[in-house]
Every structure is written in structure tokens, then in C-alpha cells.
């Protein structure tokens, strides 16, 4: 028994050939028949008077291969199935319910990624491709892969959408499980859907696609455990074999680079990471915006020093040895020993900071413009064992700090107040300097002005 397809008949059941090629267009019907069953001469049937109301023809097949092309006739994807149920509508639309699915996604006419799943649905005309059950999408080199419960081709933006317990596993990077990930055909551009909403190539197209998608909380880390990002939205784009560009957002998003001693927080962090020695991911460039916080911790002589920089915006460049931070908005630098014996805070409206990666004093130099403020609180015991406290406050228009010289300088209408052993209570002038000792405690203070000069000395 069989079903008539025009003037030919196709058997229902397994086929002897491994695959039959189904292509879009007028040849589809003939190729289904010729490739999937032996053709026989049959009397022609009278045309149906119902025209488009003629029911679809269903063909059970063994192995099958479905190829979809775009309007320019370029390959979009090819899906292969161990077994399939093929529907052929009178209007030429061909769909396939597939089991045991493998296939390729194409980019510029070349196979760029591979996929596999337990089940799938394919339709050539609309480019519809939906897979489910242990879905795996990998690049051609098998270095990066994305795993999830379901996969769908999104023809509007030419990307793959994976949903349900989705995780990215790569040669250098991994994510936690997420609800949804979008991926370019070559997997060189991957991310959560909301991270693409401001992409000028996509934002006009993706609003309807984002309407029903939840924002996923997740992490992005390197294989060496040196880098870790936490986010609400995430996108990673390969720049070259050594560099990856990333964007994360959150409330806040965070980034940690252990070998550089950097812990960053902001509503948005965008930058480049490079592969360093031993495969560690090193932050080489970053732009941070919205409630920015950068923290660096160092241990010196058994004491932990924490240096925290906050601002509205920040730009970072650096490597494993040095770094530079340019801050804008209300800028605050707070540096303190965890034991509470030293506390220093500098504020202004903008600032540049040179970082010494790995040094006991992570801020090598700084320049802050203002108005600026300085507050120093030191506690130490004198020769008699009594606890002495120096508490100093100063204001001005510009502040510089030099770690190697252990010197802080304020200029521009400086006013200084303070209390401590042998410290002058109030000073005014155009320039004010604080000299620190090797442990970071106040050693000397100077103020210069017109007329005259005032100075105070901390023994």
C-alpha cells in the first residue's frame, strides 16, 4: 500500500538509501519520491477540484537530510535525521518531524557550527528549525559548545536560540546554567538575549523576541579560575585568538581578576580580556558605568590593606604588572588597614590613578581634581606605650599622591584642621604637604601661603 503523490507513489517505511535530499522549490516533490522510494508508472489521477484544500501527503522515511536556503539561495542550515515523518503540502511546503538529529549551521556559505539532538522539526520555506532533547551546539573545531533543552533558529537576526538549562562550555571560558543564550552561527558571538537590545544591527528586530524572555542571573569564568564575572545580562565576542570582548550588566555586575588583585562592581562593565601566562584571563581594558566600585586588597607585614575607589564612571587599562584608572563623577578613594590603625580618604570630582599590581600599596600615584578633600586618621603607640591618635582634615582644589615618596600634596586655597601630638590646629595657604613614614603614618605636615608660612611636625 502507498500514498499517491501526483502521478507517483512513495512507500511508507524505511528506505534503502542512507539519506534523501529535500530542497526548496518545484523539485522537492520529485526528489522526495525518487530518493526515498522506487518509482512506478501509475495512471494519472484527475486534478482535485479543491485545489489548495487537498490534504498534505505524509511520508514515513528512514534517513533524511533537509537543507534550507535564504532568499539569496545561500545555505542556512542542514538537518539530518535517522528517521523522520515528512509532510508535503499541495502548495509545496515541506516539513519534517525528525528523530536522532544531527546537522550544520552555515555562515557565508560555509558550515560554521554543528548540532545534535534527540528530536527536531524542520521546515524549509520558513527556515524553521526547532530541536529538543539533549541539544548540543558546537563550533567546527569542537572547542566551544552550548548545551540546553531546546534550540531554535531565529531567521530575523540569523542566530541560534538555546533555552532551558543552557550552559556555555569553551576552550577558555564557561558559564553557569542560564535560561536562554543566543549564538551566532560560528559561536564567536554569544550572550543572553537582553545584551543585544542596543546592538544597532539588531535592536529594530529583536523587541518582539525579548518580550517573553526572562533575564537570567549567571556567571562567566575562565578555566584557570582567575576571572569570574557575575551578571544579569552577558555577551562575549571573540576578537582574535587571544582577546575576547565582553559586556555584563547587573545590580550590580561584578568582575574579579585574582592575579591582578582587582574586584570591580558597576551596573555595566564592558571590556577586553586577554589570555595571560598559564592560560589566565587578564583584564586589559574596561569601561564601567553606574555606581562603580573597584577594590584592591594587599597584605603588608601581616596586615591587610584595603583600597576602594568609587565613582560614576571609570576607564581601566592594564596588565598583570601595572594599571591605570580614570574616574569621573564624585570620586572617593578610601585606603585603610583592616586593624583600624590607619584610615585615609580622598575625594574630588575626577581623578587618575596609577596602580601597582601586587605591591603592598596598590595605589602608586594619584591626581584628583575638585574641589578636593583629604582625611587622615592614624593610631599608634608612643615610646611610653600610650595610644596616640592623629586626625587631620584638609580641603583644596587639587590633590596629588606619590606612594614612592610617601607624600600627599594639596594646592589651591587649602584649609587644614587637625589634632594630634605637636600638630598645629589650623593652617591656611596655597599649598599643603603631608609626609608619611614607611608604614604609612603621618610624619610631617607643611602649609605654605601668602603672607607667611606655617608648618607643623609630627615626631
Image (cartoon, rainbow, N blue to C red):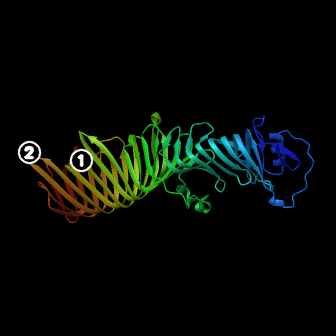
Task: Give the secondary structure at mark 2.
Answer: loop
Q: In the image, is residue 135 above or below residue 427?
A: above
Q: Looking at the rendering, which quadrant does residue 104 occupy?
A: top right
Q: Nearer the viewer, residue 171 or 287?
A: 171
Which residue is identified by label 2?
385
Nearer-N-terminus badge (1/2) = 1
Q: Are marks 1 and 2 in contact (CB under 8 Å)?
A: no
Q: Is residue 255 left or right of residue 165?
A: left
Residue at 34% x, 52% y is: 366
Q: Nearer the viewer, mark 1 or mark 2?
A: 1
Asked whether residue 317 appears in the rendered view, the answer is no
Is 186 on the left or on the right of 169, as rendered? right
Which residue is identified by label 1?
338
Q: Is residue 54 left or right of residue 405?
A: right
Q: Position of residue 80 (x, y in %)?
A: 70, 41
Residue located at (22% from left, 55% from top) = 376
Label 2 crowd (10 A; few <14 / some 14-19 / many >=20)? few
Secondary structure beneath label 1: loop
Residue 410 rendering spot, x and y as whole percentages: 28, 58
Pinpoint residue 124: horizontal percent, then vertical percent: 73, 50
- Image coordinates of residue 75 in percent, x first then y, are 73, 47
Amino acid at each position: 500500500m502507498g500514498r499517491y503523490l501526483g502521478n507517483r507513489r512513495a512507500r511508507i517505511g524505511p528506505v534503502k538509501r542512507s539519506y534523501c535530499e529535500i530542497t526548496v522549490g518545484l523539485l522537492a516533490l520529485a526528489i522526495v519520491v525518487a530518493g526515498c522510494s522506487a518509482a512506478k508508472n501509475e495512471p494519472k489521477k484527475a486534478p482535485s477540484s479543491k485545489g489548495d484544500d487537498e490534504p498534505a501527503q505524509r511520508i514515513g522515511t528512514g534517513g533524511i537530510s533537509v537543507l534550507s536556503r535564504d532568499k539569496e539561495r545561500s545555505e542556512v542550515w542542514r538537518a539530518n535525521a535517522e528517521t523522520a515523518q515528512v509532510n508535503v503540502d499541495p502548495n509545496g511546503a515541506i516539513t519534517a518531524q525528525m528523530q536522532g538529529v544531527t546537522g550544520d549551521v552555515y555562515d557565508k556559505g560555509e558550515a560554521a557550527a554543528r548540532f545534535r539532538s534527540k528530536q527536531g522539526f524542520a521546515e524549509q520555506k520558513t527556515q524553521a528549525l526547532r530541536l529538543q532533547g539533549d541539544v548540543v551546539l558546537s563550533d567546527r573545531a569542537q572547542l566551544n559548545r552550548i548545551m540546553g533543552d531546546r534550540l531554535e533558529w531565529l531567521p530575523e537576526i540569523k542566530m541560534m536560540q538555546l533555552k532551558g538549562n543552557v550552559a556555555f562550555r569553551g576552550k577558555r571560558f564557561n558559564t553557569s546554567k542560564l535560561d536562554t543564550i543566543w549564538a551566532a552561527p560560528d559561536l564567536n558571538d554569544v550572550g543572553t538575549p537582553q545584551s543585544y537590545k542596543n546592538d544597532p544591527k539588531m535592536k529594530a528586530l529583536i523587541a518582539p523576541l525579548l518580550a517573553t524572555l526572562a533575564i537570567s542571573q549567571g556567571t562567566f569564568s575562565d578555566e584557570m579560575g582567575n576571572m569570574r564575572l557575575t551578571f544579569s545580562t552577558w555577551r562575549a565576542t571573540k576578537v582574535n585568538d587571544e582577546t575576547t570582548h565582553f559586556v555584563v550588566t547587573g545590580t550590580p555586575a561584578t568582575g574579579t581578576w585574582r592575579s591582578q588583585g582587582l574586584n570591580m562592581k558597576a551596573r555595566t562593565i564592558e571590556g577586553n580580556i586577554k589570555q595571560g601566562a598559564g592560560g589566565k584571563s587578564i583584564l586589559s581594558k574596561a569601561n564601567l558605568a553606574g555606581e562603580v566600585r573597584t577594590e584592591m586588597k594587599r597584605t603588608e607585614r601581616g596586615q591587610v590593606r584595603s583600597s576602594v575607589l568609587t565613582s560614576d564612571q571609570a576607564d581601566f587599562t592594564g596588565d598583570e604588572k601595572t594599571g591605570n584608572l580614570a574616574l569621573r563623577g564624585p570620586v572617593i578613594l578610601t585606603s585603610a588597614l583592616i586593624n583600624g590603625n590607619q584610615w585615609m580618604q580622598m575625594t574630588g570630582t575626577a581623578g587618575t590613578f596609577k596602580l601597582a599590581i601586587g605591591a603592598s600599596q596598590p595605589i602608586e600615584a594619584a591626581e584628583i581634581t575638585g574641589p578636593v578633600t583629604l582625611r587622615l586618621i592614624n593610631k599608634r603607640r608612643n615610646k611610653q606605650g600610650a595610644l596616640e591618635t592623629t586626625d587631620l582634615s584638609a580641603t583644596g582644589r587639587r590633590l596629588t599622591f606619590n606612594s614612592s615618596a610617601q607624600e600627599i600634596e594639596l594646592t589651591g586655597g587649602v584649609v587644614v584642621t587637625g589634632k594630634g601630638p605637636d600638630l598645629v590646629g589650623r593652617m591656611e595657604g596655597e599649598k599643603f604637604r603631608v609626609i608619611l613614614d614607611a608604614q604609612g603614618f603621618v610624619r610631617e605636615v607643611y602649609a605654605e601661603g601668602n603672607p607667611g608660612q606655617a608648618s607643623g611636625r609630627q615626631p
